[in-house]
Amino acid sequence: MAAEATMIGNDLMLHPWESGFKLPDTFNMVSLLLERHLAGPQSERSAIIHKNETISYGELGCMANRIGNGLRQLGVAPGDRVILLLHDRPEFIALFLGAMKIGAVPVPINMLATAEDLDYFINDSQAAVVVVESELHTRLTPIIADAAHLKTVVVHGAAVPGTTELSQMMKDASDQLDVYPTAKTDHSYWLYTSGTTGRPKGVVHYHKDLVHAVEAWGQHVVQFTPEDRVLCSSKLFFSYGLNNALYLPLYYGASVILNPDRPLPEVILGLIEKHRPTGFFSVPTAYGQILNYLEAINQAPDLSSLRFCISAGEALPGSLFQRWKKKFDIDILDGLGSSEAGFIYISNRPGIVKENASGLALPGYAIEVRDELGKPLPAGELGELYVSSQTLFAEYWQKPDKTAETLVNGWMKTGDMGHIDAEGYFFYSARANDSMKVSGIWVSPLEVENALLSHPSVAECAVVAMQDAMDLIKPKAFVALKSGHTPSDDLGELEAACQREARALQIPARH
């Protein structure tokens, strides 16, 4: 009973990874993300900073309630899917929470989705409602009539004939709304995979899942508090953006800075200097772009408000880690997560960072590296990463075969290749379908890319598998140089860097 009492109180620390923790059978994640912050002084705290507007938790609660009531009036029922096709703005977060609060299932969709993509997402999810920016409505026009489950379209912005306008829907609805009593194993939210290996898959998460994830990361990686203020360069429709710009700050009653614009280096740096976040979440490519931008303009912005910088989404090269640390005297804490696992589950920690490593497994997670037959491998040997936890997705929607391939006896096959060292650090090598065998030896594109990135002339690079004249697999590198460098000047040095890497990997040098 003690754990259940904690769940309906205001205590921010639940310690869900500890033995004896019990989540109530009736549980809606909104109770942690929003409801417990609406009583007393906490309701006046800043929840969202967007352009020149600051929205308190009390105001966010009213927005979410109005949207939830508005969706009900449109016929949205518990379990119905609600597609979000919105820019990063307060209405996105209020809609996500409002839909979940009435027992519906928010489904954020990539803003760059084509009409063909949207047709697939709407029909595959059997969405009841699509909430879309008005300027994108034309993409839906050929789809709406044939979407069997779609009840209506809600637009944000300019009115569109035949649709409901979001702000008017909110004005007409009550700001009082009780939390729908979902079960902890009811659908909470979905995300669609990128579709790099076939059609995108709907990743189904339960209400219980991220209870076991958010605090494990927040406490054990950065000791997150309600005083923190975060900025994430990834958009909310991505798992990385949703986790770190919605779930994490709202869980702790902290605040988030939303960026509705493209995350260009000058935009991100301007937001950091203006709004003074304590934490910055980004991906290695964006960190590199920021450094290259600053080198080109020869300026040093004030990033002194940051107490932590986080990286995920792709492996962080050691050379990039060192460049950032030299420039700003702060470590980038790299980690590994996925939509299916729900959150970052492997991460470096302050003071114990290993360059080129994704880090250590967080409390509540078990990891193993296994061979092609699913047998665990000893430390140092390359294989596929498996993870087990309470945060894993329930299924790929209507894809039982894909679900069975991925969820195996309580473990998830991640598709990530790498090894675990003697101290438990995981070193990512490549996706399982990206690794290549050259002259009988497995080669990680990442290791070759790291060799190239160590050269001061290289801004970005990518290594892929190509067939030579004898149809043998060889790695091929595509390199973008920094301003002021030309291929004729640097090609020989880059080849030498690759040859040094090849010797380290015991690969014949001219590959």
Image (spheres, grey):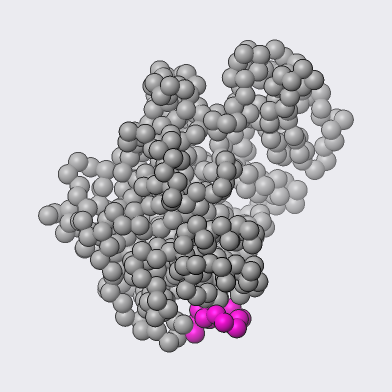
**Range of magenta residues:** 156-168
At which x and y percent is residue 483? 80, 43
Closest to the observer, 120 or 188: 120
Looking at the image, residue 440 lies above or below residue 179: above
- For the C terminus, the quadrant is top right
Looking at the image, residue 377 lies above or below residue 79: above
Looking at the image, residue 347 lies above or below residue 152: above
At which x and y percent is residue 424? 39, 26
- Quarter of the rendering containing residue 348: top left
Which residue extends farthest right?
488
Question: What's the residue at 81%, 27% (across, down)?
Answer: 491
User: Would residue 222 be seen by someone viewing this image from the given angle?
Assistant: no
Would residue 89 be counted in the magenta stretch? no
Question: What's the residue at 47%, 67% (across, down)?
Answer: 149
User: Would residue 313 be seen by someone viewing this image from the given angle?
Assistant: yes
Closest to the observer, 335 or 306: 335
Which residue extends farthest bottom?
172
Closest to the observer, 202 or 482: 202
